[in-house]
Image (tube, coloured by chain):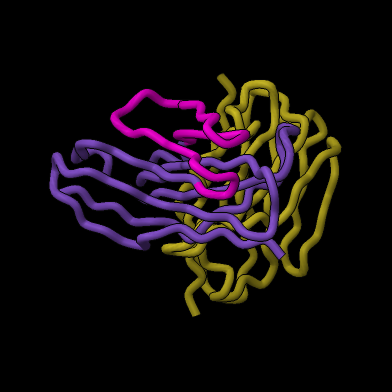
Amino acid sequence: TQLLEQSPQFLSIQEGENLTVYCNSSSVFSSLQWYRQEPGEGPVLLVTVVTGGEVKKLKRLTFQFGDARKDSSLHITAAQPGDTGLYLCAGVGSGGGADGLTFGKGTHLIIQP
Amino acid sequence: SQTIHQWPATLVQPVGSPLSLECTVEGTSNPNLYWYRQAAGRGLQLLFYSVGIGQISSEVPQNLSASRPQDRQFILSSKKLLLSDSGFYLCAWSIGRRSGNTIYFGEGSWLTVV
């Protein structure tokens, strides 16, 4: 069974600070997706990283896929209150369910103004 | 453009009562459809998926069931709810059968069993 561990589980920081959240596994994934979920809503896809070592930027968000395709990180620069939410990583691999995805439990991020 | 809607958004049901959550997708044909449950501290758990009308696969044994009476309609049901059925239920869809296709989620339904 493939597992994805996300850390930290909870993070509360001040507006303007930088932060990094991590998504780690002992398994190799063919690709990895990051979703953001706001309270009371469904998750929304932010990015998919496919190649080991790949870095993708989405405005102030930088996503990196590990060289061995076992881990990923999300770095947010100058965090804003609108970044508040639950960040979920989901790995695509042979151990995934019918949807092909293994979800982590998420990082709850709160940006205080 | 494609849209997905599920309802009701919130409901409070007594133990032992039935459940019916509905989900519809518009703007696409023959989508893969999914029901997830999201409980605190447990992440997203895939409950059911469907690749076509009348084709339902269960990922987790439980007292819930799913049906797909039409191509873009997916229903989650229970005959008798348990306290442990409380949670946030998400309907979702994807295009095609290739593993790892983007999953598009509905707005979610909060179920509290009392």
Q: Colour of chain A?
A: yellow
Q: Residue at x 42, y 36 (%)?
A: B66
Placement of B110 over or under A95, stated as above or below: below
Q: Residue at x 44, y 37 (%)?
A: B67
Residue B62 picture quarter: top left
Q: Nearer the viewer, residue B90 or A93?
A: B90
Q: Colour of chain B?
A: purple
Give the image location of residue B97, x and y in percent: 72, 33
Q: Residue at x 83, y 50 (%)?
A: A55
Give the image location of residue B94, x and y in percent: 66, 45
Examine the structure image and report whether residue B64 is included in the region drawn in magenta: yes
Give the image location of residue B109, x and y in percent: 38, 56
Q: Nearer the viewer, residue A23 or B93?
A: B93
Q: Residue at x 35, y 46 (%)?
A: B40
Name the residue at the top extreme. Answer: A1
Locate residue B54 relative to residue A90 in the image: left or right. Answer: left
Span colored in magenta: B46-73
Name the residue at the bottom extreme. Answer: A113
Examine the structure image and report whether residue A1 is included in the region drawn in magenta: no
Locate residue A74 relative to residue A51 in the image: left or right. Answer: left
- The rendered magenta stretch, by its main secondary structure, is classed as strand
Placement of B81 over or under A48, stated as above or below: above
Placement of A29 over or under B109, stated as above or below: above
The N terminus of chain A, quarter of image: top right
Q: Nearer the viewer, residue B99 or A69?
A: B99
